[in-house]
Image: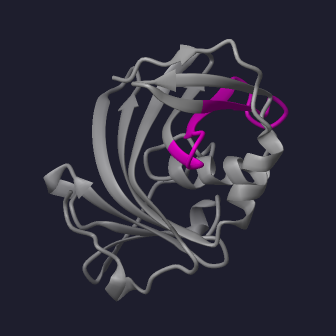
């Protein structure tokens, strides 16, 4: 696990980061997600295609038993999620609070980066890499939910995110292979193999 150390330098300009992600047309990346609740500790890996003007797509790559399941994400409501394996569309349970499950945490984190003003911004570092930590809270709608996202300061690339509910971390995400695109790739161009 990365150890993030808070620095003493002044906080970076979050408006510039917000504009960067608001203007980003598309991106592809890989993420490892740890879901750690009182009920279970589960690990997932997935490939993700972000498309600002259309649907996002994710493909689970691990665990092996779930590998190949894809989801099309058009928003934050249950009706906007389609889970599919091959030609079979899977029924999914209702999501009571969007952004708190391994399935829908990534679109919510990307939404925060492009559309929300963080309540806290700080310079940090990990393994010699300068990072910006952004903290998001929305007490009016999601009492007790805090999202923290660390962005590589020199490249404007998310590297890690954590989601807390009432002070307990329930999700952590590590991002890799981030590629910014001028437009989302077609399904044929998207690599959904295990990495």
The image shows a total of numbered marks equal to 0
Determine whether, in the image, residue 32 is placed left or right of residue 169. left
Q: Quadrant of residue 191?
A: bottom left
Would you place residue 156 above or below residue 37 in this image? below
Q: Residue furthest left?
A: 64
**Is residue 48 on the magenta stretch?**
no
Q: What residue is shown at x 68% (from left), y 54% (from top)?
A: 111
Which residue is at the front of the view, 154 or 176? 154
Task: Name the colouring of the figure.
Answer: one colour
Q: Quadrant of residue 66?
A: bottom left
**Is residue 153 on the magenta stretch?**
yes
Q: x, y percentage for residue 158?
A: 53, 45
Q: Quadrant of residue 97?
A: top right
Q: x, y percentage for residue 7?
A: 62, 15
Would you place residue 32 above or below residue 77 in this image? above
Would you place residue 150 above or below residue 101 in this image? above
Q: x, y percentage for residue 188?
A: 33, 87
Magenta range is 132-158
Q: Quadrant of the C terminus?
A: bottom left
Q: What residue is shown at x 41% (from left), y 59% (from top)?
A: 29
Determine whether, in the image, residue 42 is placed left or right of residue 142. left
Which residue is at the front of the view, 176 or 91? 176
Would you place residue 140 above or below residue 78 in this image? above
Q: Quadrant of the N terminus?
A: top left
Q: What residue is shown at x 33% (from left), y 56% (from top)?
A: 46
Q: x, y percentage for residue 146?
A: 66, 28
């Amino acid at each position: 696990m990365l150890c993030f150390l808070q620095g003493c330098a002044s906080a970076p300009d979050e408006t510039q980061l917000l504009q960067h992600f608001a203007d980003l047309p598309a991106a592809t990346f890989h993420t490892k997600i740890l879901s750690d609740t009182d009920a279970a500790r589960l690990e997932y890996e997935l490939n993700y295609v972000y498309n600002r003007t259309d649907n996002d797509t994710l493909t689970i790559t691990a665990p092996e038993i779930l590998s190949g399941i894809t989801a099309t994400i058009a928003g934050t409501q249950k009706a906007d999620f389609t889970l599919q394996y091959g030609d079979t569309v899977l029924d999914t349970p209702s999501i009571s609070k969007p952004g708190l499950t391994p399935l829908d945490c990534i679109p919510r984190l990307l939404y925060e980066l492009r559309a929300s003003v963080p309540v806290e911004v700080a310079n940090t570092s990990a393994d010699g890499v300068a990072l910006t930590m952004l903290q998001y809270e929305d007490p009016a709608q999601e009492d007790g939910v805090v999202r923290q996202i660390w962005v590589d300061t020199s490249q404007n690339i998310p590297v890690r995110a954590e989601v807390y509910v009432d002070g307990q971390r329930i999700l952590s995400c590590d991002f890799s292979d981030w590629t910014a695109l001028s437009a989302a790739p077609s399904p044929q161009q998207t690599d959904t193999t295990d990495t």
